[in-house]
Image (cartoon, rainbow, N blue to C red):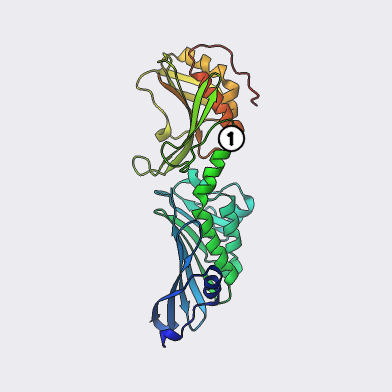
């Protein structure tokens, strides 16, 4: 067959016409007994530089399609999402949930970093995935993020322009996630009377929100580690920090009783202490356990509203750790107030905010 006579599948042709890009025929070869296969590539304009590869069987007019792009901030994070019979497969394979019942019932999620699912499976991405995949037509569709690259794969037929367009929009939704997160981060700062950096995005080092209160100042930042020592899963947490004006005497490190051992904060020295916060018991060490319990009790309502997993007070600063990505104004605001209050060594009853 003369390659010069070939035209791309309808969905590639329509995409190229609409976006003013040119499909390129990369290869034409025979795939065993299946017949001739044409391999096409076409650019996908959007938030990131993406491209689609299409392998079309010229006899059956079916195409294997992959839309892929590099994405920022996903190093060390692996994700696979595919449609399937959830009630049959759940329990036989690893499956995470994102708290969206319709999505969770339709898709299986495998990942090495559950902490990061609120970032990489936010509502726009979930909506784009749902629009892209109809199990009656392309049940083999699969989304993957591996080594900082996102790809969407599906088996399409010649006229399925709608699904191809939805696949392109899905990759674009993933590529634009850093910009959406930066906007959410800035909105959090504005709602709580703080300031956000004017460039970059929250997963970058030193990208922190700043808050000034009459009693002191605090910062809020996301801390992301691609892997922990020993190859454990990547983790993400929201850290609220307040510096102590002078070197303070009381030091403590408390963790919630369900925190994994590898994520528990530690002090170089101190005696054991246990303090209840809401429905949880916090364990750890403190330089002065009775004083530590009194200070935690003084800000108990703030901490109960913040729902932290760890509290650390060194001689120079206080850190309150919230698990994963936290954009809830009430939780973050309570954590800011608690961190600032814990910078004091005095035991005064200052827990007077509208916490519940």
Q: Position of residue 212 (x, y in %)?
A: 53, 25
At mark 1, the secondary structure is helix
Residue visible at 53% across and 68% down?
Answer: 19
Q: Position of residue 240 (x, y in %)?
A: 49, 30
Depth check: 194 or 174 in front? Answer: 194
Instruction: Please determine whether, in this image, residue 244 is positioned above or below residue 205.
Output: above
Residue visible at 56% across and 66% down?
Answer: 165
Task: Note whether residue 207 is visible.
Answer: yes
Depth check: 119 or 308 in front? Answer: 119
Instruction: Please determine whether, in this image, residue 169 is positioned above or below residue 279.
Output: below
Q: Residue furthest bottom?
A: 1
Q: Quadrant of the C terminus?
A: top right
How many marks overall?
1
Depth check: 125 or 204 in front? Answer: 204
Circle 1 crowding by C-alpha within 10 Å: few under 14, some 14–19, many from 20: some
- Left or right: where does residue 94 sit relative to residue 127? left
Q: Which residue is mark 1?
A: 190
Residue visible at 42% across and 34% down?
Answer: 263
Where residue 350 sits, quadrant-wise, is top right
Q: Position of residue 230 (x, y in %)?
A: 33, 42
Depth check: 106 or 249 in front? Answer: 249
Task: Note whether residue 312 is visible.
Answer: no
Q: Quadrant of the N terminus?
A: bottom left
- Left or right: where does residue 153 sit relative to residue 32? right
């Amino acid at each position: 067959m003369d390659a010069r006579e070939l035209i791309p599948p309808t969905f590639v042709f329509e995409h190229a016409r609409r976006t003013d890009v040119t499909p390129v025929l990369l290869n034409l070869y025979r795939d065993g007994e299946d017949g001739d296969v044409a391999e096409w590539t076409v650019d996908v304009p959007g938030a990131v530089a993406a491209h689609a590869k299409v392998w079309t069987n010229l006899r059956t007019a079916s195409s294997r399609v992959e839309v892929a792009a590099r994405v920022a901030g996903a190093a060390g994070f692996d994700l696979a999402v595919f449609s399937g019979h959830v009630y049959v497969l759940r329990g036989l394979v690893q499956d995470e949930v994102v708290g969206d019942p319709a999505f969770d019932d339709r898709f299986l999620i495998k990942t090495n970093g559950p902490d990061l699912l609120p970032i990489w499976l936010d509502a726009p991405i979930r909506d784009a995935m749902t629009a892209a995949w109809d199990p009656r037509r392309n049940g083999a569709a699969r989304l993957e993020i591996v080594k900082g690259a996102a790809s969407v794969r599906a088996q399409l037929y010649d006229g399925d322009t709608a699904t191809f367009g939805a696949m392109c929009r899905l990759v674009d939704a993933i590529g634009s996630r850093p910009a959406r997160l930066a906007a959410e981060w800035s909105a959090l700062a504005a709602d709580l009377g703080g300031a956000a950096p004017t460039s970059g995005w929250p997963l970058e080092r030193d990208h922190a929100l700043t808050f000034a209160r009459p009693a002191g100042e605090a910062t809020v930042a996301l801390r992301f580690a691609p892997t922990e020592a020993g190859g454990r899963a990547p983790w993400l947490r929201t850290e609220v920090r307040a510096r102590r004006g002078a070197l303070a005497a009381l030091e403590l490190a408390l963790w919630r009783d369900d925190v994994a051992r590898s994520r528990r904060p530690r002090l170089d020295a101190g005696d054991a202490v246990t303090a209840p916060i809401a429905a949880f018991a916090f364990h750890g060490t403190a330089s002065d356990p009775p004083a530590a319990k009194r200070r935690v009790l003084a800000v108990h309502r703030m901490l109960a509203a913040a729902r932290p997993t760890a509290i650390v007070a060194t001689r120079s600063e206080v850190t309150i750790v919230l698990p994963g990505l936290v954009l809830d104004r009430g939780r973050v605001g309570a954590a800011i107030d608690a961190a600032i209050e814990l910078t004091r060594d005095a035991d005064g009853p200052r827990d007077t905010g509208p916490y519940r």
